[in-house]
Amino acid sequence: MAELAGTATSAFINRLPDEIVGFIMWHLVYKQDLQDLISQRLPRDSTHLTQLISRVCRRWRWVALNNPSLWAQIHFGWSLAAISIYLERSRDAHLSLAIHHSYFESQHFQLVKDSFRGSMRRLERLSISWTSNLSEPPELMSWIDDIIKNRISTPILSQLHLDFPGVPRSSSRVESLEHLPRLSIICSSMISLLSLLPDPCRLTVVDASSFGLTSAQILTFLSSAPMLELVTLAHQWIEDIVPPSGDDEFQAAAQTIPVIHLRHLEKFTLGWGSKMFYDEILRNVTFPQTANIFLSVARGYRKGILDYLPSTLLGVFKLSVHLEVQIQDFEDFTSAVLVFKAARHARFHLTFDNIAPLTESGRIRNFQQQVDYRVQETAQLFEHLATYTFLFLRNILVSGKYIHSLELNTISGFLASLKDIEQLTIRTIDVDGFLDALGLSELEPCPSLRRLDIRGCEFDAEHLEGVIVDRFEWAVKLDELKVTFDPRMKIWRYGCRSAADIIRDLPGYNGEGDVLTSESESDEDTESDDEYE
């Protein structure tokens, strides 16, 4: 049967035109990440993919040899013989070259570099990956410098990946990239955003450093690259945060820069920066409503988390239809993440730094002090959120290891402010405190709630039942309930009923959710729980 299937497949392939076969081969050998051209599991002189394809049969060899682009991806880590074969057979095709620190040898690099001397005008993609544990070879850095400064002509270069973690982040060094009119992707901290860009600029992907640049300079860069789709700017380390550019400087720049419309943007990441720094940028840039914007906000000691929400985003925040409040563990580098999406606006992801480990005077807090500080900080955030009126908010997620430690009046005040919420998702250790708050009829918290998701949380089944039943009198009926089913619920008894019986009969529960498993459970118990999946 296998032989017949193989014969049928071969017959089908043999009926395809040579152009289609070549197109399939190209998709097979193409590497978006050029570092994938080499494998650490194989020796340098091993046979490479295009060579293997060309040896399948006489026809495939003819097709491969007549498609130069199949041979145009070359890794400097290959043997000199393999590189020579690929370079010769690539003929006039656009070249893609890769260099990796694990396979770099100075003498080998010099030989390979010399062999490419007459072919660099064909270079379309260049990827160099280095490690901070090794110093950068001067011959390699000189070669890169020659390309950037046009001493080596690469007129069709479109993708430039220079990954050098150990190289200081570029800020003031200005290069002219006008000799690279096709440049669309830059991933490098070595090239300053102040560099002169081609006009028109084709940049779509930028992963670079904005270290030391003012908000006005970043705006100048964004205005010169209207085709941007993916942007990641490493602005400062959290400990390097300095006050943003002065008002006079920014106002002067704002007069010459009209509002920037990044119509093609999919993802924009920038951090770290102060509230004022982001305000200066956001008031002059518009994003598509399908974009995701990630901002890392540095804050001080004397105010709450929401006080550091950029003022330019406050209006969007209040119009949110979806909101996520994620409280991080105090051990994390960040304290909280706010994710919100409003109609006709981009989705914003704001990360706030963690100030719990140190007091304002610089004294180190011990373990319990940091826990207490995070709980206090979280309570302040929830109380602050309760003061906002979210007219369009329908979906909210709250998560965090310590939010179950909040006092009842804090939780109830927060939930009572959510009059129009239809879906509530909670991720914490124990959800009974939130259930207590949901059952306070005098406050009527979340009266429009239709979907409750408490997967991953511990809860008392009878308590959950009581809350849901009591809400019938003043809230809409719960349409959907998701919990994590623990097989031990079958033996946890509440009078004549088990916890499993209670959960199964709850309004809105249709078996959706997670099933908690354990290696100590018998196969029989696991199989009997399928009805709850």
Image (spheres, helix red, strand yellow):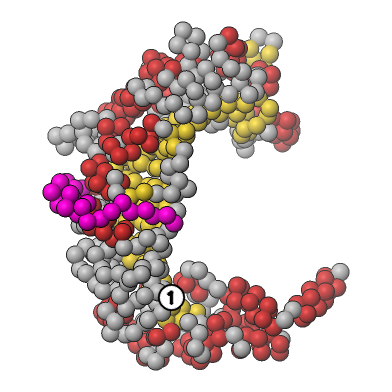
How packed mark 1 is, by other alpha carbons closer than 10 Å (few <14, some 14-19, many 20 or more), is many
Q: In this view, does 508 lie above or below 203?
A: above
Label 1: which residue?
A: 125
Provide the residue span drawn in magenta: 241-264
Disc 1 is placed on an element classified as strand
Q: Is residue 111 visible?
A: no
User: Which one is nearer the viewer's eye here, 109 or 264?
Assistant: 264
Q: Amino acid type of disc 1?
A: Arg
Q: Was residue 243 drawn as part of the magenta stretch in this picture?
A: yes
Viewport quadrant of the C terminus: top right
Left or right of 121: which side holds 46?
right
User: Which one is nearer the viewer's eye here, 203 or 352?
Assistant: 203
Q: Could you say where residue 512 lies in the image, as x and y percent from the top left?
A: 65, 31
The residue that appears at 42% across and 88% down in the rendered structure is: 119
The residue that appears at 22% across and 56% down in the rendered structure is: 256
Left or right of 211: which side holds 447?
right
Left or right of 60: which side holds 445?
left
Q: Was residue 143 drawn as part of the magenta stretch in this picture?
A: no
Viewport quadrant of the N terminus: bottom right
Q: In this view, does 190 lie above or below 415?
A: below
Q: Could you say where residue 3 lies in the image, as x and y percent from the top left?
A: 83, 74
